[in-house]
Image (cartoon, rainbow, N blue to C red):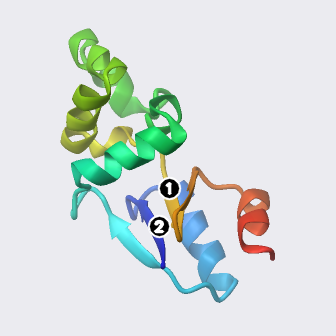
């Protein structure tokens, strides 16, 4: 099962969805703003790829956080709560290709993942 997690109006997510569709790759899309993301999934992602990769510290949502909120990102459990409360700080898209995780999108990376 291939699942692409993101926000539909994000340009990078749009590019990833377009690429997957153009390659005939069947995938489910999970809108983590509307559908949320459970703590177990976020914990798994953070463990596999690291909080530094998972949290988008370059985006406007991160920059708008208070210093107190930003400090929550240093601890796994408080970071999970922060990611659930502010899903826009999750770097996107997150691709789960049968357990193989990728964050962000580049055509080259996806070609490598899918052997295209």
Secondary structure state at the residue bearing disc 1: loop
Q: Quadrant of the C terminus?
A: bottom right
Residue 1, position in %: x, y? 48, 79
Left or right: 110, with 2 as reference point: right
The foreground one among 17 and 76 is 76
**Residue plotted at (31% across, 21% down):** 75
Q: Nearer the viewer, residue 29 or 112?
A: 112
Mark identifier at residue 104: none
- Residue at which label 2 appears: 4
Residue positioned 33% across, 23% down in the render: 73
Q: Residue at x 59, y 66 (%)?
A: 16
State the residue lying farthest toward the top. Answer: 67
Figure check: 81 above or below 19 = above
* Residue 22: % across, % down: 67, 83
Q: Is residue 20 shown above or below 40?
A: below
Using the image, determine if residue 47 lies above or below residue 71. Answer: below
Q: Residue at x 42, y 62 (%)?
A: 5
- The residue identified by callout 1 is 93
Q: Earlier in the sequence, mark 1 or mark 2?
A: 2
- Exactly how many numbered labels are in the figure? 2
Horizontal placement of 115 versus 29: left or right? right
Marks 1,2: beta carbons within 8 A? yes
Q: Residues within 10 Å of mark 1 (few under 14, many from 20)?
A: many
**Alpha carbon distance from label 1 to label 2:** 7 Å
Q: Quadrant of residue 109?
A: bottom right
SS at mark 2?
strand
Q: Residues within 10 Å of mark 2 (few under 14, many from 20)?
A: many
Where is residue 112 drawn, in percent x and y?
79, 64
């Amino acid at each position: 099962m291939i699942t692409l997690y993101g926000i539909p109006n994000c340009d990078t997510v749009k590019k990833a969805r377009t690429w997957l569709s153009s390659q005939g790759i069947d995938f489910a899309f999970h809108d983590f703003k509307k559908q949320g993301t459970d703590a177990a999934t976020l914990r798994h992602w953070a463990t596999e790829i690291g909080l530094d990769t998972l949290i988008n510290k370059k985006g406007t949502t991160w920059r708008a956080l208070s210093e107190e909120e930003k400090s929550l990102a240093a601890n796994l459990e408080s970071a999970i709560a922060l990611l659930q409360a502010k899903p826009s700080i999750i770097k996107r898209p997150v691709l789960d290709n049968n357990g193989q995780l990728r964050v962000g999108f580049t055509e080259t990376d996806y070609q490598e993942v899918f052997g295209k």
